[in-house]
Image (tube, rainbow, N blue to C red):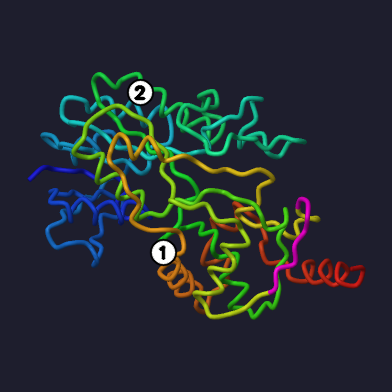
Amino acid sequence: MTRAVVVGATGQIGRAAVAALAGDGWEVTAVSRGGDRDARWPGDVRVARADRADDAALSAVVGEGCDVLVDMVAYGEREARQLVSLAGRVGSAVVISSVSVYEDDEGRNFDTQAEPDGFPRYPVPVRETQRTVRPGDGSYSTGKAALERELLAAGDRLPVTLLRAGAIHGPYCRTPRELYFVKRNLDGRPRRVLAYGGASRFHPAGVRNIAELIRLAAPRPGTRVLNAVDPDAPTVAEIGAAVDAVMGVRTQDVLLDGPPADGVGDTPWSVPAPVVCDMDAAREQLGYRPVARYADTLPETVAFIRERLAGRDWREAYPQMFRAYGDLFDYAAEDAWAEGRLRHG
């Protein structure tokens, strides 16, 4: 039996990763700030309490050593150096990064999307060789780029697999994009407005597929960067229809050809150009095969959101979602726009 330390174990990806590694025969130590044991974890999973920012606490949970350290909550240069400091006691690392590090050939990226014509136009699909943003500490994307740079530079001391995740989905998400459709259905909304003709594609990444990549990378130390997305990249209209199917409702899509109109038609997936990633490298280097398509995982995601929303204002249930996207449910504005559109053909 080999030992794995999972940092950020009670988060969305961490829960799936702990289960996948334990199921594969690893001796798993699940590390989180709360240190609470999750009832769904196998009984032999060890639980440790540690703050990711506390160098001494992280060193203590690694102890005399582990074969692999899986890190869900490393965001920048500091965390990268913290991991490298453990080289010698950690055989290899698997670290979650993000597709937001990518930059198009004109220098556009997720940090420029609010500028005129600032949304990136990536090749379809995006491969790991695509250029990335300049590392720094000014944004989430530049922080992840700095994390990658530091870890890749130290690959001779600490082999690392960096997983560039897409739009993460699954139970326990604090900012579930599916909330946009689930709440509308719960509120009995007969129609929804979708910008860009409902054709936006922002590649989802299910936690079960990410956990499978972690499971495969853990016993195969090496320094590599891999995309981590689902086998399919449905359009926003297809996602809405899939949520409807799970909830047993039918909703009319009112399609807006261009961008959102004063916020109407905007969704957490609404992008003017596709963000679709290639998974060939994971197949070639790890023998990866996806364990689930997007729609396969929706029932548990929808059930989790419904349970969390029960009897609560959505802003209380998902405060990070509100901070990230603002008011996603301005029904009065949507109705006024849709009725005007229908009156004028």
Which residue is more in the foreground, 110 or 131? 131
User: Residue pushed farthest left?
Assistant: 1
Secondary structure under the numbered disc 1 in the rendered image? helix
State the CA–CA distance, disc 2 to disc 1. 33 Å
**Residue at 61% over, 29% down:** 104
Residue 256 within the magenta-colored segment of the rendering: yes
Mark nearer the N terminus (2 vs 1)? 2
Which amino acid type is marked by label 2?
Answer: Leu
Name which quarter of the figure residue 96 lies in: top left
Residue 214 in percent (x, y) is at 29, 44
Q: Give residue 152's mark.
A: 2
Q: Which quarter shows the N terminus?
A: top left
Give the residue type at disc 1: Thr
In percent of width and height, residue 269 lies at 60, 53
- Residue 183 spot, x, y in % from top left: 59, 72
At x 15%, y 29%, the residue is 89
Viewed as shown, does residue 251 lie left or right of 141? right
The quadrant the C terminus occupies is bottom right
Residue at position x 56%, y 34% in the image:
139
Q: Residue at x 36, y 32 (%)?
A: 79
Circle 1 Cα neighbour tier, 10 Å, few/some/many (<14 / 14–19 / ≥20): some
User: In this picture, is 344 found above or below 231?
Assistant: below
Q: Quadrant of residue 78?
A: top left
Q: Position of residue 64 (x, y in %)?
A: 10, 34
Q: Is residue 137 above or below residue 322?
A: above
Who is closer to the viewer here, 207 or 234?
Answer: 234
Q: Element under label 2?
A: helix
Label 2 packing within 10 angstroms: few (<14), some (14-19), many (20+): many
Residue range of the region highlighted in magenta in the rendering: 252-259
Residue highlighted by disc 1: 297
Residue 168: within the magenta?
Answer: no
